[in-house]
Amino acid sequence: MSIPIDTFFLDPKFEGTLQQKIQRMISEGVLSGRFIPGAKLPSSRKLATHLGISRITVTLAYSELVSDDYLIAKGRSGYYVSPTAPQRTRFEPLRGEVTESVDWNRAIGQRYSGQVLVEKPVDWRSYPYPFIYGQADEKIFDHSNWRQCALQALGKREFPTVTADSYERDDPELVKYIALNSLPRRGIQAKPEQILITMGGQNALWLAAQVLLNQRRTAVMENPGYPGLRVALNQARCNVVNVPVDHAGLRLDALPAETDVVFTTPSHHCPTSVTMPLERRQQLLEKASRDDFIIVEDDYEFEMSFLNPPAPALKSLDEEGRVIYVGSFSKSLFPGLRLGYMVGSETFIREARALRMVVVRHPPGHLQRTVANFLSLGHFDALVARMGQTYRRRREVMQEAIDRRGLNVAGSDVSGGSSFWMKTPDTIDARDLALAVRQRGVLLEPGHFFFENPEDGAHYYRIAYSSIESAKISAGIDIIANTIAEF
C-alpha cells in the first residue's frame, strides 16, 4: 500500500526548519494512525517535487526518521512505515463535556492569582517601537556558540552529568565558574557551599523570603520597587514596610525599628536605575549590624554598568555575613533561561537548598551545563562586551531624543542599565499614555505597577532600549512626545 502524495503538506505554523517540518509531518502521520505500518512513502525525489523543496532535505528527514524507527529503508524499493514504529495510545472519551460541580471559591485554601505584576505583551516583537524592559535582542545574542555549548552538554562525556537526578545538588562546573569568576568581579569571595543555583532571580527572592520571614517578622522593600518581590513577600505572610527611595537609593532614616530583613537593589534601583553611593552602602551595613537585621541584595543588572565602573557589591563590603547576594543570567543572556544564583552563609543556603529541593528539586541539568560551557569558553564575556557597546549607543540616541523633545526624566543613572525612568505632565496618567501610544506601535511600561499604592505611580513610566534598534528610537520617542502634546 502506498501513501497518496496529496496527503503530504507542510504545517505553515510550525517554526522549525524544512527538514524538521517533514519529520514532524510524517511522525505525526504515524502516531495518529494515518500512516499504517508497512505503508510505502513517496520517493525522496517525488516528495521533494510535490513540496517544492530540495531532494537532499527530504533525504535527510527520511534518514532521521529511520534512526527513530518511524521508517525503514528497503534498498531500491524505498521507504516504508516501520512495523515497530512508535505508537500513541488513544482513548475515546467515555462521556461528553464535564459539568463542574465543585465550589472552587470554598475549595481553594490560598489564592495566588490576581497579583499585580508588570504586563508585557506576548507579541511585543510585532510592535515597531518596543520600549519594554528585560527582553533579549536576538540580533546581539551569540546563537552559534550557544548552540555548540548546548550540543557539548549533550555529548557522550557530559551526558551522564546533565541527565542525572542531582537531587538537591547543582552543576559543579557552573558553581565553580560563579565562585571563581562572576563573584570576584563584584568583590565577593564564596565557597561552593555558600552558592545555590536558582530558577532565576525571582525564585531566589521567593526562597529568601520563605526562609527568612514569617507572620511575626517585618520585611522592608523599596517604594517604588520590584513588583515580583512584593508578591513574594505577600506570600511569606510577613509584615511588609515600603520605604521610599531618593537620589541615592533606599532612605535609611525611614527604616522601622522592628526591621528583620531589608530587600534592596543598590547597583541599579528598580525601576529608577539610581545607584546607591558607597557611603550609603556602608551606612546601611552599619545600621544592619547595630539593629541586627539581614540584607538581601538583588544585583540583577550589574553587567550593564557601561557608563562608569560598577560600584562594589554590598556583599563585598559585608564583614559579618549579613548580606545575601542574588544574581541572575536573565538580563545578560536571555530571560527565558530562568537561571540565577544566591550567595549567603552556609546555614542559610542549606535551608534554601532544602526548600528548593521540595519545590523544583534542582534547575535543569542541561541548562546548567550549557551555561557553564558558555561562560567558561569566554562567550559570555564577549557577549557582555558587545551588549555594553550596543546599549551605550542606544542610550546616547535615546538621551538625545528625550532632550530634543523635552521629555521629563525622573530617575538618575550613573552607571548604565538599560532603561530610563520617566515622568508625565501632572495632567496625564501614564496608563492612559501607554494605551494611546500602543495604538501607534509604541510599547512602554506605566509605573503604577512598582508602587505600594498604584496611584502614587500614576505619572511615571519606564522606557527601555534593550529590545529596540538605535535607528528606531528617535521615531518612537517622537510618537510619545507627540501623544503627550495631544492630551
Image (tube, helix red, strand yellow):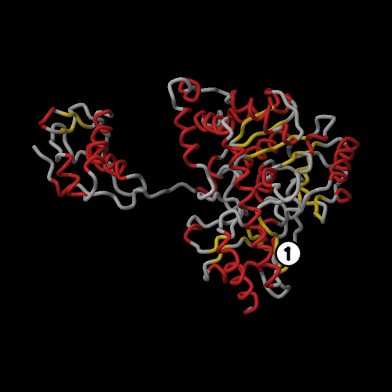
Q: In the image, what residue occupies the spot 73% across and 24% down?
A: 346
Q: In the image, what residue occupies the spot 69% across and 63% down?
A: 399
Residue 290: where, in percent of width, then height?
A: 91, 36
Where residue 288 sits, quadrant-wise, is top right
Q: Quadrant of the N terminus?
A: top left
Q: Residues within 10 Å of mark 1 (few under 14, many from 20)?
A: some
Where residue 28 sits, quadrant-wise, is top left
Between 366 and 60, the one lying in front of the other is 60
Residue 395: where, in percent of width, then height?
A: 66, 58
Residue 82: where, in percent of width, then height?
A: 19, 29
Between 90 and 48, the one lying in front of the other is 48
159 is higher (above) or lower (below) than 296: above
Residue 19: where, in percent of width, then height?
A: 29, 41
Q: Quadrant of the C terminus?
A: bottom right
In the rendered structure, the answer to whether residue 462 lies left or right of residue 52 reads right
Residue furthest bottom as drawn: 486
Residue that badge 1 annotates = 409
In the rendered structure, the answer to whether residue 423 lies left or right of residue 44 reads right
